[in-house]
Image (spheres, coloured by chain):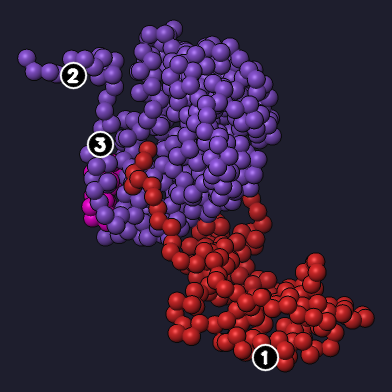
Amino acid sequence: MSFQPDHYITEDIKAIPPSGIRKFFDLCANSKDIISLGVGEPDFVSPWTIREACVYSLEKGYTMYTSNYGMLELRQEIVRYLYERFGLSYDENKEVIVTVGASEAIDMALRTLLNPGDEVLIPEPCYVSYQACTLMSHGKPVMIPTTAAKEFKLTPEDIEAKITPKSKVLMLSYPNNPTGAVLTRDELLALAEVAKKHDLIVISDEIYSELTYEHEPVSFASLPGMKERTILVSGLSKAFAMTGWRVGYIACDAEFIQAMVKIHQYTILCAPIMGQIAAIEAFRNGIKEVARMRTEYDHRRRYIVKKAKDIGLDMVSPEGAFYAFPSIEKFGMDCETFATRLLQEKKVAVVPGNAFGKSGEGFIRCSYATSMKQIEEAFHRIDQFIND
Amino acid sequence: MKDLKTEILNILAEDSTKNRDTVAAMVGIDRAALDQAIKELEEDRIILKYTAIIDWDRINTEPMVYARIDVQVQPQREVGFDDIARRIGGFPEVKSLMLVSGKFDFALMVEAPTMMEVSNFVSGKLSTIDGIKSTWTNFVLKKYKENEVFYGEEESDKRQAVLL
């Protein structure tokens, strides 16, 4: 019998569905001269002060491991930032760990919390890793569809409907990728009640928290009684335009950190020191750049909201992150067909909504992390595509 | 959110040729309100002029000569520096003029077709103005960045076309 790699791969990994829209991605990768509204990362390059600080540190010879928890200086900056921005108070010695992006943080949090069969409540549409990481941790993802009718906002009733004795973790991700939805303090308070009632641990992915446009951001951990049951996940990728540096962090109860550091130290050891040094500079001197970028995203967002209305694209007005999530239902195509044809006929790339879960069918994600000029041209072409 | 006019100004300062309908949408007002706001800004001389940043050296067969000239003056009674600033700034060779702290009083950017003409301007016109004590001419060798823009090629987008 010939050698078959498939025999050696675990059933758990095989059970994770491959991305259903791989074909579409390949199509994008092979297309030339396209305008892409498909990119889930800032179009800005990391601010120069951050890049310069890293270059200087390399010249000085900072090329070694750091503490498993991350550099103390960086943890201090994280703590100071969380206090000043969200009124949160954490101990840099016990309650913070620096991770390789928020992605590692999510994986580590789930692996720390889940026993086989434990259920993770995941509002959908959502970022793609929650479901996969839950499966890799032998947990059971329980998807909670949110709808355009309710502005893609998760409600207490939505959660209640999916609660079972196995429910253990509630995954929150606001501002949301792909919908751009943001929850107000009152809306979050209502969810906090449910978390308390059913004794859920909340993993709050707040990677986009610097990018809200209508209200000041609220951290879930800052709500009364929620700090102890919240694993706060965030990072510098979106706010500071530092995606490639791979620096994220977790702030939460010290016992959770103690548990998580076991995974972190034996798998990752530490986040790369270059990224950590860059992150220190970002917190110290990059905050005004965050504000500048936010203003620019906001201009683009308002333009898209107006333009979508003008050309007859139904859309919930996004309030955070850098995504708009219009409905394409009335054009009589599924989202993949729509996206494929838009790419082939008008050379505009968007992401089919079903990439973010079944409830994303009927929508497309348009990222406005691209220049105004490109956005103008893209919407001009979308207008032609749907109206000619 | 910032004051509306400041927001409009920031957008125009970045690109004054931007489509006005687009600008209106970006700040969330209708076109008529935007036009009115811009008209007011122009009338109040908050917006002084719309111009372009040009890499002249790439298009001129005879490139211009630029110099930064530092000037020390004797401020005059009652009018301080303002009167002499107006005299210096009146010359078309003077592209910009600033009162600065430090060893000198004024910093000028001067532009002329040849080094000789810059020299003639300094010796014949500038330094003969009453109240000017000394001048210091620094010829520009190469321009790298102006109004936030680097001369040369635009940076390309290095990101992958689609990313979740």
Residue at image point 55% right, 56% down: B28
Q: Earlier in the sequence, mark 3 or mark 2?
A: 2
Report the residue that reaches farthest toward the right: B77
Choose mark 3 or mark 1, whichever is in front.
1
Q: x, y percentage for residue B140?
A: 60, 74
Q: Circle 1: is it few (<14), some (14-19), or many (20+) Cα within 10 Å? A: few
Mark 2: amino acid:
Asp
Residue on which the image places disc 3: A22
Q: Amino acid at mark 3?
A: Arg
Q: Position of residue B96 (x, y in %)?
A: 67, 77
Residue B120's tag is 1
Q: Label 3, label 1: how many angstroms apart (C-alpha)?
A: 69 Å
Q: Nearer the viewer, mark 3 or mark 2?
A: 2
Snapshot quadrant of residue A373: bottom left
Say which element carries label 1: helix
Q: Position of residue B27 (x, y in %)?
A: 56, 57
**Magenta-colored stretch includes residue A337:** yes
- Colour in which chain B is drawn: red
Depicted A8 relative to depicted B28: above or below: above
Q: Quadrant of residue B72?
A: bottom right
Question: Front-most of A54 and A86?
Answer: A54
Q: Nearer the viewer, residue A352 or B63?
A: B63
Disc 3 and disc 2: Cα gap in Å?
Answer: 20 Å
